[in-house]
Amino acid sequence: QVQLVESGGGLVQAGDSLRLSCAASGRTFGSNAMGWFRQAPGKEREFVAVISWTRTITDYADSVKGRFTISRDNAKNTLYLLMNSVKPEDTAVYYCAAALAPYATMSTNEYKYWGQGTQVTVSS
């Protein structure tokens, strides 16, 4: 059974840094694009970042560009999201996702596997 398990969320203050991890099991995702999404209360799930299977192509939502960095360790089958200079508007449940293709975009339709999410709360 394929599982994506996020960790690293918590309560932080504005300006702090946080690193989220997503450990995959049940299959390897070394040939798949992987991404991070988030969902705030009362809002739709939105794209945060994506990384290709080669790790050479990344894309970010404008709201996090320059502050967040997505990375992956294919040997460990793990995805990361380094969040710097966090803001209260970054408060959300963060989900990792794996696409079937080696490259993917911000569309949730391209992702087949999803984690259960980890809560990130940023206080002002």
Image (cartoon, rainbow, N blue to C red):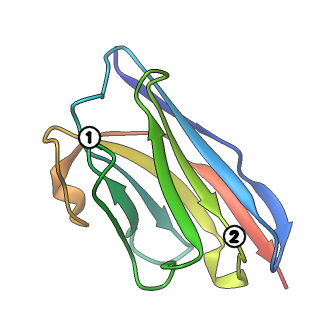
Q: What is the quadrant of the C terminus in the image?
A: bottom right
The amino acid type, in three-letter code, at marker 2 is Asn
Q: Distance between the residues labelled 1 and 2?
A: 24 Å
Q: Which of 17 and 42 is in front in this view?
A: 17
**Could you say where residue 36 lies in the image, as x and y percent from the top left?**
43, 56
Name the secondary structure under disc 1.
loop
Q: What is the quadrant of the N terminus in the image?
A: top left
Q: Which of 122 and 65 is in front in this view?
A: 65
* Residue identifier under label 2: 84
In the visual, does 82 lie left or right of 14?
Answer: left
Number of marks drawn: 2
**Could you say where residue 104 lies in the image, as x and y percent from the top left?**
19, 55
Q: Say which residue appears at 29% left-offset and 28% top-offset.
A: 30
Q: Say which residue appears at 39% left-offset and 73% top-offset.
A: 44
Q: Which of 53 and 3 is in front in this view?
A: 53
| Mark 2 Cα shell of 10 Å, populated few (<14), some (14-19), many (≥20) | some
Residue 11, numbered circle: none
* Residue identifier under label 1: 53
The amino acid type, in three-letter code, at marker 1 is Trp
